[in-house]
Image (cartoon, rainbow, N blue to C red):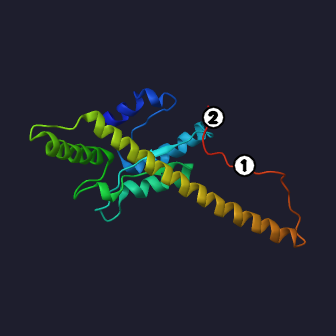
């Protein structure tokens, strides 16, 4: 399923500027993300990870967060509210959406009605986009805190006798323009 999802993403005409990699072992994600960051320092890296919420270590989020620390990647995991017992990944979310839309279609059109795959994928896409924006906002908020802390340290140094290098401007790059 992961390979198929990666292929769906790679072949999506709306994602023509993206490269897609699929890791089959969560422990590999931090190393792969760090290597990608070295090779593509300006790239906008996004880790679409599992949410192993019912396991003691939640390896999907654990290793995705390590990848974030190693590479600055944005991490997007499925919200628990869209998962049932024993489920952990975006394919499960997609299946649950398909099931929910089919139930609604059957209420309106009878027991043989089914929701289209495209309609469930549209809903799934909107959920992933919302989770991505939430993760991106979290990164921006963390960057704001770091900038504030750095500014306070600079101010402290300016008020001390320590020499300090001054910069005219600061810029935070969020997405690779290439």
Residue found farthest to the left: 111
Query: What is the count of numbered marks?
Result: 2
Spatial distance from mark 2 to mark 1, Cα to Cα? Answer: 14 Å
At mark 2, the secondary structure is loop
In this view of the protein, can residue 1 be seen by the observer?
no
Q: Is residue 104 visible?
A: yes
Residue at the image position 80 percent from the left and 65 percent from the top: 154
Instruction: State the image quarter where residue 165 is shown.
Output: bottom right
Q: Position of residue 74 (x, y in %)?
A: 51, 49
- Taking the spot 83% from the left edge, 53% from the top edge, the residue there is 167
From the top left corner, tell me how far across and down residue 112 is, in percent: 10, 37
Q: Is residue 111 found left or right of 31 in the rendered image?
A: left
In the image, residue 7 sits, relative to residue 95, either above or below, namely above
Q: Which mark is residue 151?
A: none
- Residue on which disc 1 sits: 171
Q: Which residue is mark 2?
A: 177
Is 50 in front, or is 104?
104
Horizontally, residue 159 falls left or right of residue 66, namely right
Q: Quadrant of the C terminus?
A: top right
């Amino acid at each position: 399923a992961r390979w198929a999802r990666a292929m769906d993403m790679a072949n999506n005409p709306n994602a023509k500027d993206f490269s897609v990699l699929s890791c089959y072992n969560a422990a590999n994600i931090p190393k792969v993300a760090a290597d990608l960051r070295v090779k593509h320092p300006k790239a906008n890296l996004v880790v679409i990870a599992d949410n192993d919420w019912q396991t003691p270590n939640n390896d999907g989020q654990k290793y995705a967060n390590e990848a974030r620390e190693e590479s600055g990647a944005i991490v997007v995991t499925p919200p628990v509210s869209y998962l049932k017992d024993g489920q952990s990944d975006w394919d499960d979310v997609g299946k649950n959406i398909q099931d929910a839309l089919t139930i609604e279609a059957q209420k309106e059109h009878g027991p043989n009605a089914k929701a289209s795959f495209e309609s469930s994928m549209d809903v799934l896409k909107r959920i992933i986009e919302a989770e991505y924006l939430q993760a991106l906002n979290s990164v921006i908020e963390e960057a704001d805190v770091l900038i504030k802390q750095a500014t306070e340290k600079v101010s402290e140094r300016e008020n001390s006798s320590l020499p300090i290098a001054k910069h005219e401007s600061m810029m935070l790059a969020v997405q690779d323009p290439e």
